[in-house]
Amino acid sequence: MLREFKQFLLRGNVVDLAVAVVIGIYFGLVIEAFVKDIITPLIGAIGGTSSFAALNFTINGSHILYGDVINAIITFVIVAAIVFFAIVKPMNWLIERSHREPTPDPTTRKCPECLSEVPIAARRCSFCTSPLVA
């Protein structure tokens, strides 16, 4: 049972998934710090406030921190844009490129009578025996 568990853990796709999750988490943290420490203070300086994180209002003694929500939305949009333009678009392009129609075989042609494929050098169709014009 332990041997099977070890085989499961060491399969390529499980290890790849674990690496992807860890890289994704830390990539998100880097983008979050970038947004919180650089982007929102720049936008806040234009808008007249020091940072979005400080934006809040109070209802019945409860503080609603809508500035943190704005930071999270900006972080999400940046991460989604990076994932889309750096991963999804190139993968779609590669998949589309690999599924192109194969070029027709230049050694055959279609018979004008039965539309079957015959060799270019043939003078008569092997399927319907009609004469072929060169």
Image (cartoon, helix red, strand yellow):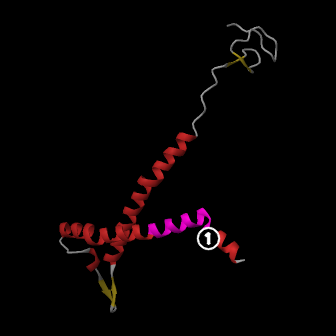
Question: Which image quarter is the C terminus in?
Answer: top right
Q: Is residue 115 above or below residue 55?
A: above
Q: Quadrant of residue 51?
A: bottom left
Side (left or right) of 54 relative to 111: left
* Residue type beneath disc 1: Leu
Q: Residue 46 at what x, y percent from top left?
A: 18, 66
The stretch drawn in magenta includes residue 117? no
Q: Residue 53 at what x, y percent from top left?
A: 29, 77
Q: Nearer the viewer, residue 125 or 44?
A: 125
Q: Residues within 10 Å of mark 1 (few under 14, many from 20)?
A: few
The stretch drawn in magenta includes residue 17? yes
Task: State the extent of the magenta-drawn residues as a range.
Answer: 9-24
Residue extending furthest toward the front: 3
Residue sitting at x 56%, y 41%:
98
Residue sitting at x 59%, y 28%:
103
Side (left or right) of 54 relative to 83: left
Disc 1: which residue? 9
